[in-house]
Image (spheres, rainbow, N blue to C red):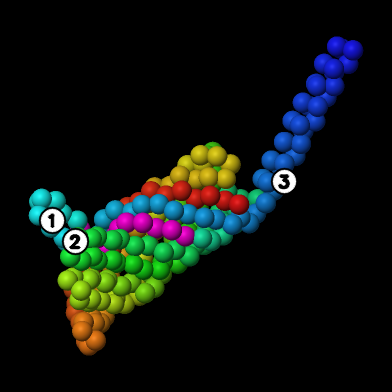
Amino acid sequence: MKSFVVNALAVAALSVSCMSVQAEEVQDSRSLYFALTGGFTFGGDELAKFKYTDGDTAKLEAGGLVNLGVGVLWQSQEQPIAAQLTFNYQFDHASAKNGDATFDRIPLEAVVFYTGVQDWRFGAGVRYVASPELEIELNGDTATVDFEPTVGFVVEAGYQVTNNIWLNVRGVSEKYEADTATFGGRTMSVRSSEEVSGNHVGVNLVALF
Protein backbone atom coordinates (compact mmCIF):
# COMPACT_ATOMS: atom_id res chain seq x y z
CA MET A 1 0.00 0.00 0.00
CA LYS A 2 2.81 2.39 0.92
CA SER A 3 4.58 1.59 -2.36
CA PHE A 4 1.37 2.29 -4.28
CA VAL A 5 0.95 5.68 -2.58
CA VAL A 6 4.56 6.63 -3.31
CA ASN A 7 4.18 5.61 -6.94
CA ALA A 8 0.89 7.51 -7.23
CA LEU A 9 2.47 10.66 -5.80
CA ALA A 10 5.39 10.32 -8.20
CA VAL A 11 3.04 9.99 -11.17
CA ALA A 12 1.01 13.01 -9.99
CA ALA A 13 4.14 15.11 -9.56
CA LEU A 14 5.32 14.10 -13.02
CA SER A 15 1.92 14.99 -14.48
CA VAL A 16 1.94 18.44 -12.83
CA SER A 17 5.47 18.99 -14.10
CA CYS A 18 4.44 18.07 -17.65
CA MET A 19 1.37 20.33 -17.44
CA SER A 20 3.57 23.21 -16.23
CA VAL A 21 6.01 22.72 -19.11
CA GLN A 22 3.11 22.56 -21.58
CA ALA A 23 1.61 25.76 -20.12
CA GLU A 24 4.95 27.54 -20.49
CA GLU A 25 5.24 26.31 -24.08
CA VAL A 26 1.76 27.62 -24.85
CA GLN A 27 2.57 30.94 -23.22
CA ASP A 28 5.93 31.18 -24.98
CA SER A 29 4.27 30.48 -28.32
CA ARG A 30 2.18 33.64 -28.06
CA SER A 31 3.11 36.64 -30.15
CA LEU A 32 0.70 39.30 -28.87
CA TYR A 33 0.30 40.46 -25.28
CA PHE A 34 -1.77 43.07 -23.47
CA ALA A 35 0.54 45.46 -21.56
CA LEU A 36 0.09 47.61 -18.46
CA THR A 37 2.84 50.05 -17.51
CA GLY A 38 3.52 52.43 -14.65
CA GLY A 39 6.51 54.29 -13.29
CA PHE A 40 8.25 57.51 -12.32
CA THR A 41 10.08 60.09 -14.45
CA PHE A 42 12.50 62.85 -13.47
CA GLY A 43 13.84 65.89 -15.30
CA GLY A 44 12.88 68.72 -17.62
CA ASP A 45 12.67 72.48 -17.14
CA GLU A 46 11.04 73.91 -14.03
CA LEU A 47 7.48 75.11 -14.78
CA ALA A 48 6.32 76.22 -11.34
CA LYS A 49 7.66 76.40 -7.81
CA PHE A 50 6.03 76.75 -4.40
CA LYS A 51 7.95 77.90 -1.33
CA TYR A 52 6.63 77.04 2.11
CA THR A 53 6.96 79.07 5.29
CA ASP A 54 9.34 76.46 6.76
CA GLY A 55 11.72 76.94 3.83
CA ASP A 56 10.82 73.77 1.95
CA THR A 57 9.94 73.98 -1.74
CA ALA A 58 7.83 71.98 -4.19
CA LYS A 59 8.48 72.32 -7.89
CA LEU A 60 6.81 71.20 -11.08
CA GLU A 61 9.00 69.84 -13.88
CA ALA A 62 8.25 69.39 -17.58
CA GLY A 63 9.66 65.85 -17.43
CA GLY A 64 7.99 64.61 -14.25
CA LEU A 65 6.62 62.70 -12.51
CA VAL A 66 4.19 59.77 -12.94
CA ASN A 67 3.52 57.83 -16.14
CA LEU A 68 0.71 55.26 -16.51
CA GLY A 69 -0.16 53.41 -19.69
CA VAL A 70 -1.93 50.56 -21.47
CA GLY A 71 -1.08 48.95 -24.77
CA VAL A 72 0.08 45.86 -26.64
CA LEU A 73 3.39 44.06 -27.12
CA TRP A 74 4.23 41.94 -30.16
CA GLN A 75 7.11 39.45 -29.89
CA SER A 76 8.44 37.79 -33.03
CA GLN A 77 8.80 34.00 -32.73
CA GLU A 78 11.40 33.84 -35.50
CA GLN A 79 13.60 36.85 -34.79
CA PRO A 80 14.85 38.54 -31.57
CA ILE A 81 12.60 41.53 -32.17
CA ALA A 82 9.61 42.93 -30.26
CA ALA A 83 7.46 46.02 -30.67
CA GLN A 84 5.37 47.81 -28.06
CA LEU A 85 2.63 50.39 -28.54
CA THR A 86 1.24 52.18 -25.47
CA PHE A 87 -1.28 54.92 -24.75
CA ASN A 88 -0.13 56.86 -21.66
CA TYR A 89 -1.08 59.56 -19.18
CA GLN A 90 1.87 61.47 -17.67
CA PHE A 91 1.66 64.20 -15.04
CA ASP A 92 3.51 66.16 -12.39
CA HIS A 93 1.81 67.94 -9.50
CA ALA A 94 2.93 70.45 -6.86
CA SER A 95 0.81 71.99 -4.14
CA ALA A 96 0.86 74.52 -1.32
CA LYS A 97 -1.70 75.82 1.19
CA ASN A 98 -2.89 78.60 -1.12
CA GLY A 99 -2.68 76.80 -4.47
CA ASP A 100 -1.43 73.99 -6.65
CA ALA A 101 -0.13 73.31 -10.15
CA THR A 102 -0.37 70.38 -12.56
CA PHE A 103 1.35 69.65 -15.85
CA ASP A 104 -0.22 66.75 -17.71
CA ARG A 105 -0.11 65.28 -21.20
CA ILE A 106 -1.08 62.17 -23.21
CA PRO A 107 1.90 60.43 -24.87
CA LEU A 108 1.42 57.72 -27.50
CA GLU A 109 4.61 55.62 -27.70
CA ALA A 110 5.91 53.13 -30.27
CA VAL A 111 9.13 51.32 -29.32
CA VAL A 112 11.00 48.51 -31.11
CA PHE A 113 13.18 46.17 -29.01
CA TYR A 114 16.09 43.83 -29.63
CA THR A 115 15.54 40.75 -27.43
CA GLY A 116 18.55 38.62 -28.40
CA VAL A 117 20.25 38.86 -24.98
CA GLN A 118 18.81 36.53 -22.35
CA ASP A 119 16.57 38.32 -19.81
CA TRP A 120 17.27 41.71 -21.43
CA ARG A 121 15.76 43.93 -24.10
CA PHE A 122 17.04 47.14 -25.64
CA GLY A 123 14.75 49.50 -27.50
CA ALA A 124 14.32 52.82 -29.22
CA GLY A 125 11.28 54.58 -30.59
CA VAL A 126 9.18 57.69 -30.88
CA ARG A 127 6.32 59.23 -28.92
CA TYR A 128 3.68 61.72 -29.90
CA VAL A 129 2.61 63.89 -26.96
CA ALA A 130 -0.95 65.24 -27.19
CA SER A 131 -2.71 67.85 -25.05
CA PRO A 132 0.21 69.10 -22.91
CA GLU A 133 -1.24 71.61 -20.44
CA LEU A 134 -0.03 73.51 -17.39
CA GLU A 135 -2.70 74.54 -14.90
CA ILE A 136 -1.98 76.78 -11.91
CA GLU A 137 -4.51 77.62 -9.20
CA LEU A 138 -3.46 80.33 -6.75
CA ASN A 139 -5.66 82.00 -4.13
CA GLY A 140 -8.79 80.84 -5.95
CA ASP A 141 -7.70 82.07 -9.40
CA THR A 142 -6.89 79.62 -12.20
CA ALA A 143 -4.55 80.08 -15.14
CA THR A 144 -3.74 77.55 -17.86
CA VAL A 145 -1.06 77.36 -20.52
CA ASP A 146 -1.66 75.03 -23.45
CA PHE A 147 1.37 73.75 -25.36
CA GLU A 148 1.64 72.53 -28.93
CA PRO A 149 1.62 68.74 -29.40
CA THR A 150 5.17 67.48 -29.83
CA VAL A 151 7.18 64.48 -30.98
CA GLY A 152 9.89 62.98 -28.79
CA PHE A 153 12.35 60.11 -28.89
CA VAL A 154 12.69 57.19 -26.45
CA VAL A 155 15.53 54.81 -25.57
CA GLU A 156 14.97 52.00 -23.08
CA ALA A 157 16.74 49.03 -21.49
CA GLY A 158 14.66 46.39 -19.74
CA TYR A 159 15.32 43.38 -17.49
CA GLN A 160 12.86 40.48 -17.36
CA VAL A 161 12.06 40.07 -13.66
CA THR A 162 9.54 37.26 -14.27
CA ASN A 163 8.08 35.67 -17.37
CA ASN A 164 5.51 38.48 -17.61
CA ILE A 165 7.09 41.46 -15.86
CA TRP A 166 9.80 43.80 -17.18
CA LEU A 167 11.71 46.40 -15.16
CA ASN A 168 12.91 49.22 -17.43
CA VAL A 169 15.12 52.30 -17.29
CA ARG A 170 14.51 54.85 -20.00
CA GLY A 171 15.42 58.23 -21.38
CA VAL A 172 13.19 60.62 -23.34
CA SER A 173 14.12 63.66 -25.40
CA GLU A 174 11.34 66.15 -26.19
CA LYS A 175 10.59 69.88 -26.18
CA TYR A 176 7.40 71.89 -25.71
CA GLU A 177 6.33 75.19 -27.23
CA ALA A 178 3.63 77.28 -25.51
CA ASP A 179 0.59 78.05 -27.65
CA THR A 180 -2.09 79.86 -25.64
CA ALA A 181 -2.69 81.06 -22.09
CA THR A 182 -6.06 81.47 -20.39
CA PHE A 183 -6.71 83.60 -17.32
CA GLY A 184 -9.91 85.20 -16.06
CA GLY A 185 -11.89 83.82 -18.97
CA ARG A 186 -9.59 85.43 -21.54
CA THR A 187 -7.36 83.42 -23.90
CA MET A 188 -4.33 84.91 -25.59
CA SER A 189 -1.52 83.66 -27.81
CA VAL A 190 1.84 83.19 -26.07
CA ARG A 191 3.81 81.71 -28.94
CA SER A 192 7.56 82.39 -28.80
CA SER A 193 10.81 80.95 -30.06
CA GLU A 194 11.73 79.78 -26.56
CA GLU A 195 11.06 76.08 -25.98
CA VAL A 196 10.59 74.17 -22.75
CA SER A 197 12.74 71.06 -22.32
CA GLY A 198 10.81 67.96 -21.33
CA ASN A 199 13.90 65.74 -21.42
CA HIS A 200 13.75 63.17 -18.65
CA VAL A 201 14.85 59.78 -17.37
CA GLY A 202 12.61 57.25 -15.71
CA VAL A 203 12.02 53.78 -14.36
CA ASN A 204 8.89 51.69 -14.87
CA LEU A 205 7.35 48.25 -14.76
CA VAL A 206 5.56 46.59 -17.66
CA ALA A 207 3.21 43.69 -16.92
CA LEU A 208 2.14 41.43 -19.81
CA PHE A 209 -1.11 39.47 -19.93
Q: Which of marks 3 and 1 is nearer the N terminus?
A: 3
**Which label sits in the foreground, 2 or 1?**
2
Q: Is residue 67 magenta?
A: yes
Q: Does the CB distance between marks 2 and 1 fall below 8 Å? A: yes
Foreground of the two, 136 or 54: 54
The residue identified by callout 2 is 97
Q: Circle 1 — which element?
A: loop
The residue identified by callout 1 is 52
Label 3 crowding class (10 Å Cα cut-off): few <14, some 14-19, many 20+?
Answer: few
Give the side of residue 21 with respect to residue 114, left or right.
right
- Relative to residue 45, is residue 207 depicted above or below? above
Give the side of residue 144 with respect to residue 3, left or right.
left
Q: Which of marks 2 and 1 is nearer the N terminus?
A: 1
* Whole-percent x, y for residue 64 in the image: 30, 58
The residue identified by callout 3 is 26
Q: Bounds of the magenta span?
A: 59-69
Label 1 crowding class (10 Å Cα cut-off): few <14, some 14-19, many 20+?
Answer: few
